[in-house]
Image (spheres, rainbow, N blue to C red):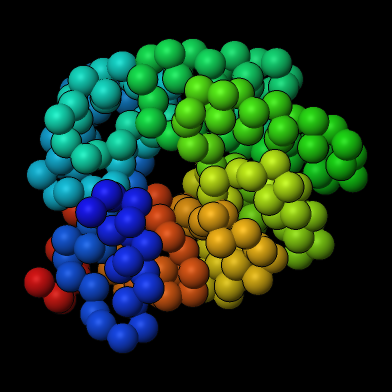
Amino acid sequence: MSRFLMEVSLLQRMNSTPMTKAQLACVLESTLLKPETRTSDIHALCEEAVDLGLAGVCVPPYYVKEARRRVEGSPVRTISVAGFPLGYNHTAAKVEEIKKMCHDGVDEVDAVVHITAIRDGNWSYVENDLSAMVQIAHLKNTPIKLIIESGMLTPEEIRKVCQLAEQWQVDFIKTSTGMLAPGPDAQDIRYIKSQLTRPETRIKASAGIRTAEKALALIDAGADRIGTSSAAAILAGYPVA
């Protein structure tokens, strides 16, 4: 069974059967995006992800090639970020970031929506920015997660950005960068889920997720992936084998 189908299958079974620790591991993405990150930190992150059977490692663009080498031969995905963390980079710069990380071997791109344009109500700009990022990622056969920084947006802004994301067939809505606003709770995930109509559009919850209890609550609310810097602690605190 492919890793994608395994994720879908376990989420479908969530309400009837407890997840195993291995099933929980395969929806966790281990994140290390601090600017002071060193090569040795990336090595440790990747080694842990392979040992634990995680979904992926999310690393700075500078380390995509290194992370790719370190997880080679395993199911662990190499993930990186574009327009991070503020989202207000020029669209052309975001597109070039995505091109470069795809060239370096990234498996998935997490790209920040233009938060400034959203707050300014310039939805044409938001759509142009979003569509350019999605089109270049998909041209490179790379899934893209749109980071919407939900903790900074109103419910109506979230509704509109989800609508645009689905129009342009974004693969995931990702809640947060972890740098600018509080991470999501279960109610936030349920609201985002209620705005999505395409079954192909999935949700990645991220920021402030440090315990098995919180991770499971977000999954139960509709999250398909969990971005965390505490993957090992989450799995160690999970009581099911």
Q: Is residue 178 above or below residue 153?
A: above
Between 185 and 195, the one nearer to me in the picture: 195
Q: Is residue 153 left or right of residue 66?
A: right
Residue 229 showing in the rendered view: no
Is 236 drawn above or below residue 81 in the view shown? below
Q: Is residue 239 visible?
A: yes
Looking at the picture, how far across and down is residue 40, in whole percent? 19, 23
135 w.r.t. 117: above or below: above
Give the total of numbered labels. Answer: 0
Kindly identify the residue that appears in the image at 23 percent across and 54 percent down: 1
Q: Residue at x 37, y 73 (%)?
A: 12
Residue nearest the viewer, comparing 60 with 126? 126
The quarter of the displayed image where residue 45 is located: top left
The quadrant the C terminus occupies is bottom left
Front position in the image: 54 or 168: 168
x, y percentage for residue 121? 90, 45
**Residue that extends furthest to the front in the rendered view of this protein:** 1
Q: Quadrant of residue 132?
A: top right
32 to the left or right of 138: left
> Which residue is pictured at 76% across the width and 65% down the height?
155
Q: Residue at x 49, y 74 (%)?
A: 221
Q: Position of residue 222 (x, y in %)?
A: 49, 69
**Residue 177 location, x and y as percent?**
53, 43
Asked if residue 52 lies left or right of residue 199, the reply is left
